[in-house]
Image: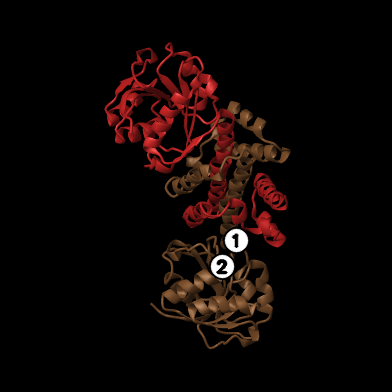
Chain colours: A brown, B red
Amino acid sequence: MQNFNISIIGAGNIATHLAINFTKKGHLIEQVYSRNINNAKILAKKIKANPINNLANLKTNIDIILICVSDSAIIEVVNQLNFRSPLIAHTAGSVPMQALNKFDSFGVFYPLQTFSKNAKLNLNKVPFCIEANSEVNKKKLIDLANSISNNIFELNSEERLQAHLAAVFANNFSNHMFAMAEQMLKKHKIPFDILKPIILETATKIQQIPPQLAQTGPAVRNDIKTMEKHLALLTSQHLENLYSFVSQSIQNLKNQ
Amino acid sequence: MQNFNISIIGAGNIATHLAINFTKKGHLIEQVYSRNINNAKILAKKIKANPINNLANLKTNIDIILICVSDSAIIEVVNQLNFRSPLIAHTAGSVPMQALNKFDSFGVFYPLQTFSKNAKLNLNKVPFCIEANSEVNKKKLIDLANSISNNIFELNSEERLQAHLAAVFANNFSNHMFAMAEQMLKKHKIPFDILKPIILETATKIQQIPPQLAQTGPAVRNDIKTMEKHLALLTSQHLENLYSFVSQSIQNLKNQ
């Protein structure tokens, strides 16, 4: 395995998880940039890197620079970088690779996962979606991803945006269903704990069974009586609309 | 621990999981009823019980009869039972306990979990929601639940229906979000495998962090640019409506 010298722009959740895992695998993190020098220092200290808060101080005699800032902040960062090499990659799902085309060597290194700063996360099953402007650069990014994960996908920018959109449904929207359930239970002083096992089992089940086949519940059974009982319990027009809309969507998918 | 003699009406997923776990813990399953004698035989064989397909043959000199049929089939079963004892309980989330009030001793033994026939499932964390028409009967059902699970809740019929409704959001609706994601990826020939880790992490995260706090994504950040990119990718009016509706709901919840 090749070891790389890497600098990281960003000190948030993705930056932290990647930097720590890279260091564990023998890569060297040179610099960590954050607008807020204290955030840069917190991460830099964990991985024995140098914290900076001025992009002009970024060294370019290294192998790879990773931009680990939010999707919407990437352009602003890129506008402040006045070099053409080394290889630079961003880690965003929704930003086209061409956002980096002012550099000679560029690509994308997108981990399709939800990162929380405090949750310990083993990256070795995390899907890394790789794209680059040349075969040589692609190989470098794949080598880097392979050093921390067994789950590499080569996706172009369009496919990556599709995967990102699908992840919004699979992660953001499903989490919102958990949040609505939590809110309903709270009104009746039933602890949310009561749903934790079924939520974990729902996610575990689709590791083996395609979700469309795993679908259960009154909507897919067209159990109108139970659906009417549920609708009668809902305490707002918004919740009723959400219940009806998603139930209808379940039935549409079944009948396709 | 007290061992009970139990008969089970039904031979589906819940019946199977309960019967096997009861037997493991030393309870004796006397009879298994199914309209289809072959289904009764398949389960009965696993647990050395007697299969029957006529409810008139149900023996009543036992401790507990459990009705493990779908919510909508309970009344039909009850109408065919012409005895007043022993203690009888159903396992449904949405059916009031009073559906059994023609018996002397009755209650509810509702496991709040999604059961698949083939998925092996450890029941010891499954929430069992217990209700009964007397303290003595409640104690019996709690003792039975305690023998296979550490996670017992005493809920009345109204609370149980609320929990069942919340579970529809947490399980059925979130699974539907997975199914929609699967469908989108299929159109672009991206394997659904790419989402399995994020789905598992989403469910794992809320074991520790309340879902409302765990919410991420463009909607909760009000990242309009990314939401517009996503909407432009969606290939049907229905998907656009679903995306907008759930995104709006995420924003409503945030602003409450």
Which corner quadrant of the image does residue A180 belong to?
top right
- Label 2 sits on a secondary structure element that is helix
Q: Position of residue A226 (x, y in %)?
A: 58, 29
What's the chain of the residue with tag 1? A
Q: Position of residue B1 (x, y in %)?
A: 33, 34
Q: Position of residue B208 (x, y in %)?
A: 52, 54
Q: Position of residue A222 (x, y in %)?
A: 57, 30
B197 with respect to B244 (left or right): left
Amino acid type indicated by mark 1: Leu
Binning the other alpha carbons within 10 Å of mark 2 as few (below 14), some (14 to 19) or many (20 upward) gives some
What's the chain of the residue with tag 2? A
- Label 1 sits on a secondary structure element that is helix
Q: B28 or A212: which is nearer to us? A: B28
Amino acid type indicated by mark 2: Asn
Q: In this view, does A112 lie above or below A84?
A: above
Q: What label sits on residue A161 in the rendered view?
A: 1
Q: Which residue is identified by label 2?
A: A13
Q: Is residue B129 above or below residue B256?
A: above
Whether residue A253 is visible to the viewer of this picture, yes or no, is no
